[in-house]
Image (tube, helix red, strand yellow):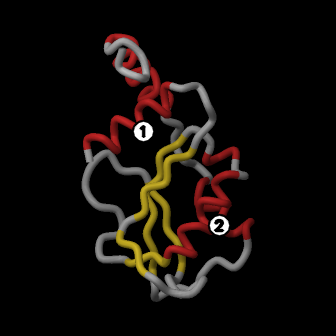
Amino acid sequence: MDFKFTGENYLRASGVPYTIVRPGRLGDMPKGKSGKMLAGQLKQGSFAPGSVSGRSDVARVCVAAAFSEDAKNTTIEIGADASQPPQESHEELAKLFVGMKKDGTLAATAAAATSSSGGLDGH
């Protein structure tokens, strides 16, 4: 996990627009079978514990994030609620990102760590 977080910090410090999507437990199921997709931001702990998100539904969330200004420069945990009907449209999925906090302070911290380590390639 340390390498994953290091990579995320390099991405944040790069200046390139991004969205980091952290899915919980993944499953193989058809589109929409995960139920309603959920999104949140946590500093620690588990988001939507016990939920299983289908890979195709996670991909749909990633596509929606790519076209959403609300998702730009954020880190988002996603899960699913199988007891609720799934979002059918791109617009419904885009609502997941409304009100998400930007990673601004994390990017500044990552940039400082990157510059003190000699750059993105470690040299």
**The image quarter in which residue 122 lies:** top left
Q: Where is residue 34? Give x, y as percent.
A: 50, 82
Residue 32 sits above or below residue 59 on the image: below
Please report the residue visible at 33 percent of the width from the left and 11 percent of the height from the top.
116
Q: Nearer the viewer, residue 95 or 25?
A: 25
Please report the residue visible at 49 percent of the width from the left and 61 percent of the height from the top.
39
At label 2, counting other C-alpha atoms closer than 10 Å, the crowd grade (few under 14, some 14-19, many 20 or more) is many
Residue 89 sits above or below residue 108 on the image: below
Please report the residue visible at 51 percent of the width from the left and 41 percent of the height from the top.
101
Q: Where is residue 104? Give x, y as percent.
A: 50, 28
Kind of element beneath mark 2: helix
- Specify the quadrant that holds the C terminus: top left
- Residue highlighted by disc 1: 8
Disc assigned to residue 81: none
Query: Disc 2, disc 1: CB below 8 Å?
Result: no
Kind of element beneath mark 1: helix
Please report the residue visible at 60 percent of the width from the left and 59 percent of the height from the top.
62
* Amino acid type, mark 1: Glu
Residue 75 sits above or below residue 35 on the image: above
Count of marks, rendered view: 2
* Amino acid type, mark 2: Leu
Distance (Cα) linking label 2 and label 1: 23 Å
At label 1, counting other C-alpha atoms closer than 10 Å, the crowd grade (few under 14, some 14-19, many 20 or more) is some
**The image quarter in which residue 50 lies:** bottom left
Q: Nearer the viewer, residue 41 or 6?
A: 6
**The image quarter in which residue 94 lies:** bottom right
- Residue highlighted by disc 2: 93
Q: Is residue 59 left or right of residue 107?
A: right
